[in-house]
Every structure is written in structure tokens, then in C-alpha cells.
């Protein structure tokens, strides 16, 4: 939809979620709240639920019923993969500690703890480039990098820079699709 048309139709846009009901179909709960000195009223809270499985989400015009876009799980995944074709997962092959620094495309640099408790400990998606770095080449060599499910071996290059009059050595790599 062109931007001008979107501005005109914005007030009429609606979303509808299409679902199928699934077992156990319905549920309800109730709980009694007793009076206290701060709240001297007793009352009952009851909740009713319908169990559903979402099928699709539709963006439509409330006046005309025209559907502008239909979202399904499959279409959202496909669109995401098209927008972000690089999917990086990083895990450890042995116990180690430290930080892994990373930058997605032209975004800000971030960091994460290198952890053996979560596999993979880092999962990110990018449009074209992921830059990774760390302080210790031995620690970096214990990490397993997968791009779109395929193991890759980053080419680590040394990088020195000065921070607060201290020379800091790092090892950096750039990960891209072949």
C-alpha cells in the first residue's frame, strides 16, 4: 500500500485473528479475595478462557472489508528470512568464560556472556553482516559458529586500539553469506 493511501485509510484499519478452537476448548477459574483493613471488601474473581490455535492474522479495511495483508506463521517466517538472510547461532564446545561482542549490520555493538547453560548462547539475524570480537583467541577458538545451520570457521584478525590510555588487544571477525 502506498504511504499516502495508508495515511488516508489508517483510521479504518483493523486486525482480525482467525483461530481454531482446540481441546480442552474452555476453562474457568474463580478465587475469593477476603477483606483486609486496607481493602475491607470481599469479592470473587472469575475468569473464563477459550483455548485456540491461531491460524492467521488479517489487516483489513473496516468499511469495505478489503484485506490488505494476511499473516500466517509460515508467511511471517518466510518474510523474516527474506529480510534477514543471515541466521547466526553460537555455542561452546567446551567450558569457557568470557564475553562475546557482536554488531549486527550497522547497528550498535552489543555483548553477551559466553555461557554453557544455554545452547546456543547467542542467536541473531542480520541483513548482510555480523561482526564478532573477543579479547582472548583461545576462548574464541572454543566457540562453534553456525550460519544458517552450517558450521563456519571465522578468520580472526588482531585489532589493537587505545582506550583511556590503555592499549587493548582484541580479535575480530566478519561473518557474511558466502
Image (cartoon, rainbow, N blue to C red):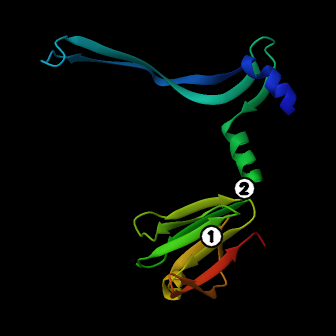
The quarter holding residue 45 reads top left
Residue extending farthest to the front is 165
The quarter holding residue 127 reads bottom right
Residue extending farthest to the left is 37
SS class of the residue under badge 1?
strand
Horizontal side of 12 relative to 156 (left or right) equals: right
Pick the quarter of the image with the C terminus: bottom right
SS class of the residue under badge 2?
loop
Q: Please say if 32 is above or below 76.
A: above
Q: Residues within 10 Å of mark 1 (few under 14, many from 20)?
A: some
x and y percentages locating residue 92 in the rendered image? 48, 74
What numbered label is drawn on residue 84?
2
Tell which of 48 and 169 is nearer to you: 169
Tell which of 123 and 98 is nearer to you: 98
Horizontal side of 117 relative to 6 (left or right) equals: left
Q: Please say if 131 is above or below 80.
A: below
Q: Residues within 10 Å of mark 2 (few under 14, many from 20)?
A: some
Question: What residue is rendered at 71% in x and 33% in y?
Answer: 71
On the image, numbered disc 1 is attached to which residue? 146
Amino acid at each position: 500500500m502506498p504511504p499516502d493511501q495508508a495515511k488516508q485509510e489508517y483510521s479504518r484499519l483493523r486486525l482480525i485473528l482467525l483461530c481454531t478452537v482446540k481441546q480442552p476448548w474452555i476453562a474457568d477459574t474463580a478465587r475469593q479475595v477476603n477483606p483486609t483493613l486496607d481493602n475491607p471488601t470481599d469479592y470473587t474473581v472469575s475468569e473464563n478462557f477459550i483455548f485456540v490455535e491461531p491460524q492467521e492474522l488479517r489487516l483489513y479495511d473496516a468499511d469495505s472489508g478489503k484485506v490488505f495483508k494476511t499473516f500466517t506463521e509460515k508467511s511471517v517466517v518466510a518474510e523474516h528470512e527474506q529480510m534477514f538472510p543471515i541466521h547466526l547461532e553460537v555455542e561452546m564446545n567446551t567450558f569457557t568464560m568470557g564475553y562475546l561482542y557482536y554488531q549486527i549490520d550497522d547497528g550498535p555493538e552489543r555483548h553477551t556472556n559466553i555461557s554453557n547453560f544455554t545452547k546456543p548462547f547467542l542467536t541473531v539475524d542480520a541483513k548482510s553482516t555480523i561482526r564478532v570480537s573477543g579479547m582472548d583467541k583461545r576462548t574464541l577458538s572454543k566457540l562453534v559458529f553456525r550460519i544458517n545451520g552450517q558450521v563456519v570457521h571465522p578468520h580472526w584478525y588482531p585489532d589493537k586500539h587505545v582506550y583511556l590510555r590503555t592499549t587493548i588487544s582484541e580479535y575480530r571477525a566478519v561473518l557474511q553469506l558466502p
